Image: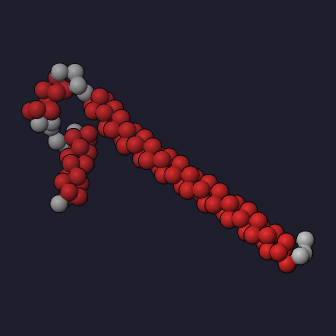
Amino acid sequence: MRAQKTSYRKEKELRRGVGLMEPSSSEATELDKGKGREKESDEIVNKELKKEMKTMKLTGKMEKKVEKEMKKDVEVKEQVEVEVEVKVKMIMKKRGRK
């Protein structure tokens, strides 16, 4: 249903742009008030930019989370390696080897 509405709107805008369709009365009053198509297109562009910025922020947050998890994993691996080395040394000392 949404796809049909949006395609109809796009078709309507295209016709209006070509001059085949006259603007509706509410759109005509908006145009008369000085709110032209440029402002409308700027608003649309701004909305799209805001959406992109929001997704970029979210992806940035996700990247930071992944980096933190990777750092934690590396720290845990290093800690385990150190613990293993210490245990091996203790076992070797008990057995009399260096």
Q: Residue at x 11, y 36 (%)?
A: 24
Asked if one can make out residue 98 in the rendered structure from this viewpoint, the answer is: yes
Q: Residue at x 77, y 67 (%)?
A: 85
Of all residues shown, which one is farthest toward the bottom? 95
**The one of 25 and 18 positioned closer to us in this rendering:** 25
Picture coordinates of residue 68 (x, y %)? 56, 52
- Rendered image quadrant of residue 96: bottom right
- Rendered image quadrant of residue 93: bottom right
- Rendered image quadrant of residue 2: bottom left
Picture coordinates of residue 98 (x, y %)? 90, 71
**The one of 74 and 29 positioned closer to us in this rendering:** 74
Q: Residue at x 25, y 48 (%)?
A: 10
Tag count in the figure?
0
Of all residues shown, which one is farthest toward the top? 33
Residue 96 lies, with reference to residue 7, above or below; the image says: below
Q: Which quarter of the rendered picture does the N terminus lie within?
A: bottom left
**The one of 95 and 25 positioned closer to us in this rendering:** 95
Picture coordinates of residue 70 (x, y %)? 60, 57
Q: Residue at x 37, y 43 (%)?
A: 51
**Left or right of 3 on screen, residue 95:** right
Asked if one can make out residue 81 in the rendered structure from this viewpoint, the answer is: no
Residue 8 lies, with reference to residue 37, above or below; the image says: below
The scheme the figure's colours follow is: secondary structure
